Image (spheres, grey):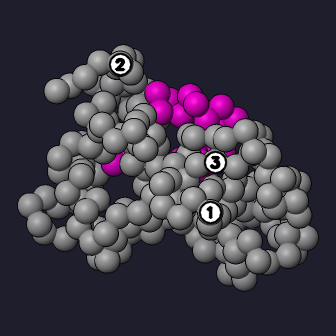
């Protein structure tokens, strides 16, 4: 289930920044079981993404009070991945077409990362919502490409709203169902069935 522009067998792949990695039922790493990861960076040296569907119960207000007014429901921290869980990555969705804005790095359309050291009041008129992730998912050079070749991930197009859904637990089946065909059938794969 490779996306267009990707190569197999050690040849280079086009950047997958802004695409979704959707865990296949074959992926057995508990850190990524039924996860949907938005890749915020993919370069020859590796890749970095955040898990979009692992909400915690920790309110954004408890950790980043000044930013909490911009947090979308559920306004809680999300587990972005197992790497550096004490760090934070913030995704923002802009209200207007993206123009150069200090502290904002575009990932997909109006969605990008935002620098949390910037004054949130400066961003208020431009940002329609944020989501804050504790930690991230990271891959070294060639590691992600290998996992894709092994069948651990589907690489799918992201929609701007994927990172900001109200019911993040429903994101994995929702993304699969919208693909149609056999991919939609995977959304109904029982969670406790082993492929080994």
Query: In what element is the residue under mark 2?
Result: loop
Which label is found at residue 130? none
Q: Quadrant of the N terminus?
A: top left
Residue 166 relative to residue 16: left or right: right
Residue 17 within the magenta-colored segment of the rendering: no
Residue 23 relative to residue 118: left or right: left
Residue sitting at 57 percent across and 41 percent down? 54
Which comes before the other along the chain, label 3 or label 1? 3
Residue 105 relative to residue 151: left or right: right
Residues in magenta, as a range: 154-174
Residue sitting at 56 percent across and 28 percent down? 170
Which label is found at residue 86? 1
Label 3 – label 1 distance at C-alpha: 12 Å
Which comes before the other along the chain, label 1 or label 2? 1
10 Å crowding of disc 2: few (<14), some (14-19), many (20+): few
**75 and 173: which one is in front?**
75
10 Å crowding of disc 3: few (<14), some (14-19), many (20+): many
Above or below 134: residue 113: below
**94 and 189: which one is in front?**
189
**72 and 183: which one is in front?**
72
Which residue is the site of mark 3? 78
Mark 3 and 1 residues: CB-CB less than 8 Å, in contact? Answer: no
Query: In what element is the residue under mark 1?
Result: strand
Camera sees residue 18: no
Which label is found at residue 192? 2
Which comes before the other along the chain, label 3 or label 2? 3
Mark 1 and 2 residues: CB-CB less than 8 Å, in contact? Answer: no
Q: Check the image and name the residue furthest to the left.
A: 9
Residue sitting at 34 percent across and 42 percent down? 29
Label 3 – label 2 distance at C-alpha: 24 Å
């Amino acid at each position: 289930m490779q996306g267009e522009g990707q190569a197999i067998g050690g040849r280079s792949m086009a950047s997958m920044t802004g695409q979704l990695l959707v865990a296949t039922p074959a992926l057995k790493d508990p850190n990524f079981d039924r996860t949907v990861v938005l890749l915020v960076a993919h370069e020859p040296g590796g890749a970095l993404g955040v898990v979009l569907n692992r909400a915690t119960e920790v309110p954004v207000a408890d950790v980043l009070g000044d930013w909490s007014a911009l947090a979308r429901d559920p306004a809680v921290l999300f587990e972005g991945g197992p790497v550096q869980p004490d760090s934070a990555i913030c995704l923002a969705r802009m209200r207007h077409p993206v123009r150069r804005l200090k502290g904002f790095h575009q990932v997909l359309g109006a969605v990008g990362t935002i620098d949390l050291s910037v004054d949130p009041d400066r961003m208020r008129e431009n940002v329609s919502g944020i989501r804050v992730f504790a930690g991230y998912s990271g891959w070294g050079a060639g590691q992600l490409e290998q996992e894709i070749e092994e069948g651990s991930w589907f690489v799918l197009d992201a929609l701007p709203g994927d990172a900001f859904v109200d019911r993040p637990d429903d994101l994995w089946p929702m993304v699969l169902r919208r693909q149609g065909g056999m991919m939609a059938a995977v959304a109904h794969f029982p969670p406790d069935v082993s492929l080994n």
